Image (spheres, coloured by chain):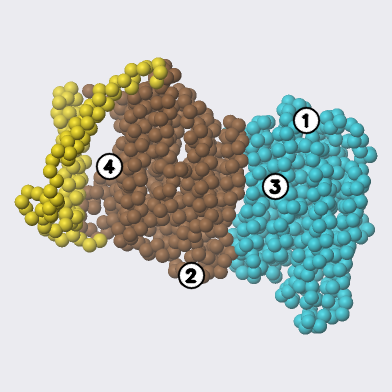
Amino acid sequence: MHVPADYYLRILPELVLTATAVLIMLIEGGARLGSRAALSGTVALIGTAAALASVAVQSAHRGEAFSGMFRVDGFSLFFHGLIIAATLIVLLLSIGYLRAQRLQRGEFYALLLFATVGMCLMAGSVELIMVFIGLEISSICSYALCGFWRASARSSEAALKYLLLGSFATAFFLYGIALTYGASGSTNLYVIARSLSDVLAGHGSLILVAAALMFVGLAFKVSAAPFQVWTPDVYEGAPVAVTAFMSAGPKAATFAVFLRIFYVALGRYSHTWFWMIWVAAILSMCLGNLGALRQTNMKRMLAYSSIAHAGYVLVAFAALGEHGISAAMFYLACYVAMNLGAFAVISNLAQQNERFIDLHDYAGLGFRFPLQSVCLTICMLSLIGIPLTGGFLGKLFIFKAAFQNHLVGLAIVGLLNSALAAYYYLRVIAFLYMRPATVEVSQPQRSLSMNVAMVACAVGVLWLGIAPNSLLNFVVHSAGALTGR
Amino acid sequence: MDLLNHSILSALLIAPLIGALLVLLAPGERAVRWLALLSSLATLLLSLHLPFHFQNAARGMQFAQDVPWISALNIHYAVGVDGISLWLVVLTTVLSLVSVLTAWNSIRHNVKSFYFLLLLLQAGIIGVFISLDLFLFYVCWEITLVPMALMIGAWGGAQRSFAAVKFFVYTMAGSLLMLGSILWLRNLTGTFNVTAIRTELASGSVVLAPHTEVWLFLGFLVAFCIKTPIFPLHTWQPLAYTEAPLPAVIMLAGLMSKMGAYGLIRFDVTLFPNASHRLATLVVVLGLIGVVYGGLLAFVQTNLKRIIAYSSLSHMGLVVVGAFSLTTIGTQGAVFQMISHGVTTAGLFLLVGVLYARRGSLELRDFGGIASQMPVFAGLFVWLAMAAVGLPLLSGFIGEFLIFLGAFTAQHWFGIIAALGVILSAMYLLRMTRLTIWGEPNATAAGNAAISDVGTLEGWVLAGLAILTLWLGVGSPLFLKPTLLSAQALQPISAPAPATNTASPLAQLKRGVL
Amino acid sequence: MNSQPNYMANYLPILIQLGLALGLSGGILALSWLLGLHRRTRRKLAAYECGVEPVGDAQNRFAVRFYLVAIIFILFDIETVFLIPWAVVFRSLKLFGFFEMLVYMAIVLAGFFYIWRKGVLDWNTPERAE
């Protein structure tokens, strides 16, 4: 049997990440060094950076690998880059965060990297079983990460809730895969697409059920309504660094799977699943924003906001075709940048035992901690959708796609929701700069890595808003390639 | 000179940004203040290039520049001015300088942040007035919200946080409806470029269904009505004007309210002539309600800032009446009134700022009879109040008169009610003057005995504004000439003759093509 | 499903099987309940009726270590699932298969090393407090 070397180059990021994670486990089990965790953190950083660099290698070797299970195209490259970059930011912020929480354990980094491997596999797989394996790898690591702060009952509660509901959702997804296989006789997305177009009008209802089941499983993972109830509790209970991670990478990876399955494999049946997406989009936007209005816990507020943002991406999803895909992709990139930036600041300000995590703690911090406040402000403005930030351009792109496909109602609901959302994001800025301090917040620890994470996200948000040409063109191009086949 | 003509607008946009950057890097408070002053002075000088080189006889946009920006969405950095935006740009640079000078003494904490935001705001406002690309316009339009909200919220009065959030969310909601319209229009025409859209619509290569045009028109209208503000979407305004710090309120009342009115002329009237015709009466009636209602409210206020806030509502209502009289003369009047109101309202706010700095109060009952202690102040106060009332020879008169002409041409009763507004403005401004400056020294106002007259800086700024009102009033042809062709180009009727309401809108449209 | 009427019909035997199983077990239970004698003494109602006295409650807390061992057993047992098919096709995989399996075993060994050094295999050491 001959396996071309290209195959390995096509999964190079995954290989690098796996090797790094295994190395970290060896370090953890190995030398009884005092600074073991610091070493693990450094190794994780280097490994992830190398993985990010190896996406470039991957991009030079486009094509299929391993009997068509894995596929390197613009779409998967984009998500590989996005996911690994997100992990890099999470690593940067968690190095400082874990030190502040006295949670320094190398296992954290290993779990994070394994989860990233799973997400990368999700982004690149064109085979349902492989997708499922990737999904499980990343999910199981996330469950463990949620409960990583073992001294906190809330953290354990979050992990348990996430585990139980997550397994349930995965089961739905698996059932959907089984029915898809039953209807089409394959688990390869492109083969499914072909066989569904060849045969039978008669399997429509079976496909509809399969699509619905897969939708349930995936909607749960991206915390889209009506499968969003777990989000606030889990986001609130998990350590901030993990919340940051969960709101970024897994969401992007699951949307990648979502888009690929529904557009590639079930593209022909868009008339049947379109309404699911439509309803979920409206529900997510409205429930997310309404829920966020009254939150004062920063983590909880961003949890509701992440539901709402899943709704915006679903709007792009519902705007069928290339415009929709490219809008969803671009928006996810912006969302990851602005959300991670916000969480980086929150994790920096939280300090030991996450003492300062409430909005009221932020009163009057604006001029005391300028770096943190400016970064948080930029991210909040982007979440609102103020021009010159990525959040605005992403939203514009989404609503443009919606208008283009005559989803005027959906676009209007989305725009009104953006106005509603402006209130609670703005409140953060208002607390920072416009209220006198009520709580004695101590100086957050100085952590170079955290500062780098904050500034990188803020700069990224502005870059995406001001000079997005290269990324936009790439996204448009790869979205075309996804549907082109 | 050609190079300068091509890049002058970009220079105007970039100059405040460079200033903001320098302010950010400046070491001390003194350096910050001087750098901000230098930057705004430089921008003012640059902006004076525009009226000197503006071709009064040329149609279309001048000093235009067009560079591709975001290619995937066909977004261009397209700027240019015509007679309508010309003076607004100059007004922006003038009032920014006034604002920077006002902040010299009135802003005492976090000076660097304040000046940074102020200069950012200036760039945004200039951007609004010069954009020819709907996307660029929207970017500048929204970006002005952020510094303004922060300025209100961080340096404002007691209710500053609430005022800032209300201001932000209120205006943002309207802007998003406008964004909806912009995207819809983009979808129909395939471009964001205002001139191209107008050409497409006028040439008939893109035909808007009547109801589509009305919805698009309304999307823009709501955003502009909120910003201007126009009754009934004005409720954020008194609070924001009262709570904002003085330099911010000059920008807010003097310039940002003009953004709304300018948008009405540049986008609603220009892009949707048919819908404008159908809904003109509605908009004019809203403007008239603002004129009368604002005037009546101003008459009964006991707080000086609120009087001026409601007078703004009233005066900006007049601008809307002028713009939607859909006559050349009315549009010219609207533009002139915007300039005049910008100058006078900035002056009035400065005057009450002087009082507030000395007494820490803006309640009418705390003042009265201060003319004897503050003769210079009293003189300036009366001058600027008269300019706002519309005394002939001063600036307010010209704008109001032209607007009346336009309103009478459109409908007689428009003009009659609008004229009523002027009577009201005389009533409340004279009442304010009487209760503040003249009369018996107030018994409860013990602090007035030792009140000092205007300082050197305050005096010069106010005197400058006063002279400006006189110049605007006396030299009005100089200011009106550049606006003529641009105002004509907007109108279905190409000459300032009595309206021929019998002509069909389409025929009028054909004659009014750029 | 109309175009292929026998698609669901394939499941008919399973349905019959299910019915039979339910019927048989249910029937036996019902019959013994109907026909049998009912003597409700304390002894008879005890949890076990095999002569051993019940001691205490069945709902005890186990040491978490039992679970750990069980999980580790399952994890390392899985490798057999991969080893056996690999052994079957080893000839056709040639050297490539050999090295692939070496890599796989190395990863498993790394995990083994990890749990070993973490003291999971040491039954006697007291659990470390976090």
Determine contact: label 4, label 1, CB under 8 Å: no
Instruction: Specify the amino acid type for callout 4.
Output: Ala
| Residue placed under numbered mark 2 in the picture | A439
Q: Are marks 4 and 2 in contact (CB under 8 Å)?
A: no
SS of the residue under disc 4: helix
The crowding category of the residue bearing disc 4, from other C-alpha atoms within 10 Å (few below 14, some 14 to 19, many at least 20), is some
Chain under numbered label 1: B
Q: Give me the C-alpha separation between circle 2 and circle 1.
A: 61 Å
The residue labelled by disc 1 is B202
Q: Quadrant of the N terminus of chain B?
A: top right
**Is tag 1's residue or tag 3's residue first in the polypeptide sequence?**
1
- Identify residue for label 3: B223
Numbered disc in front, either 4 or 1: 1
Q: Give the image location of residue B23, x and y in percent.
A: 62, 60
Question: What residue is shown at x 78% (from left), y 82% (from top)?
Answer: B444
The chain coloured yellow in the image: C
Chain hosting mark 2: A
How far apart are the alpha carbons under marks 2 and 3?
A: 38 Å
Mark 2 is surrounded, within 10 Å at the Cα level, by few (under 14), some (14 to 19) or many (20 or more) other residues, namely few
Q: Residue at x 37, y 17 (%)?
A: C4
- Check contact, mark 2 vs mark 3: CB within 8 A: no
Is residue B191 placed above or below B21 in the rendered structure? above
Instruction: Name the amino acid type tagged 1.
Output: Ala
Q: CA distance from mark 3 to mark 4?
A: 55 Å
Under tag 3, what secondary structure? helix
Q: Colour of chain B?
A: cyan
